[in-house]
Amino acid sequence: DNVTPCWARAASRVAPMPELVVSNACVTQYQLAVEELDAQGLPVGGTEKRFRLNHYFEANLSMFDVMGLRPNTIYGVQVRAQTGGEHWGLWSQATRVATMRQMEVTVELINEHNLSVSWARDKPHWLRDAAEGEGLPCPADPEEI
């Protein structure tokens, strides 16, 4: 499984904070963080096997393919920019994404001339429960799934 986050600088809706403003500063690099989250949207902690990526990019890049994600798992994605080669901005708001369940493939018939194959992917439990009116919220934004 994989995800391809992309980012762009949005117009600011808040007053600038003097400690973050550098005059005539250009973005010199970006930092991307992807972290595995639990069902409540919190970072997976402890000794559990988890996915965590912390990667730096030149300023001319604004997209990256994150590979090696686990099926049926929630991830938080954030990015921040560095200006002037030394000043880091605030992290973006975390965007939550969920990978799909693994595809199940079944071979139903094999003979000398034919092969019959079927495949299916169960919906994640949180999506099935929400459809049945049990009120569990989707862990990611619906447009991102």
Image: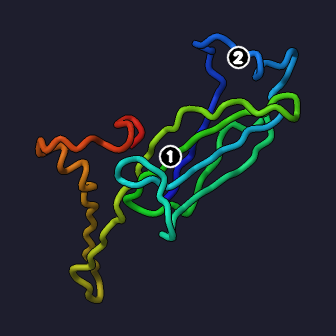
Residue 26, labelled with which disc?
none
Decide if residue 45 is on the left or right side of residue 91.
Answer: left
Tag of residue 17: 2
Crowd around label 1: few <14 · some 14–19 · many ≥20 (10 Å): many
Q: CA distance from mark 1 to mark 2?
A: 26 Å
Q: Where 66 falls versus 27 (above or below)? A: below
Q: Residue at x 67, y 52 (%)?
A: 54
Front disc: 1 or 2 = 2
Element at label 2: loop
Which SS class for mark 1? strand
The answer to which of 40 and 79 lies nearer the viewer is 40
| Quadrant of the snapshot with the C terminus | top left
- Residue 128: give x, y in percent of width and height: 19, 50
Residue 69 in the image: x percent, y percent?
Answer: 51, 60
Rendered view: 132 above or below 19: below
Residue 4: image location, x then y, percent: 56, 46
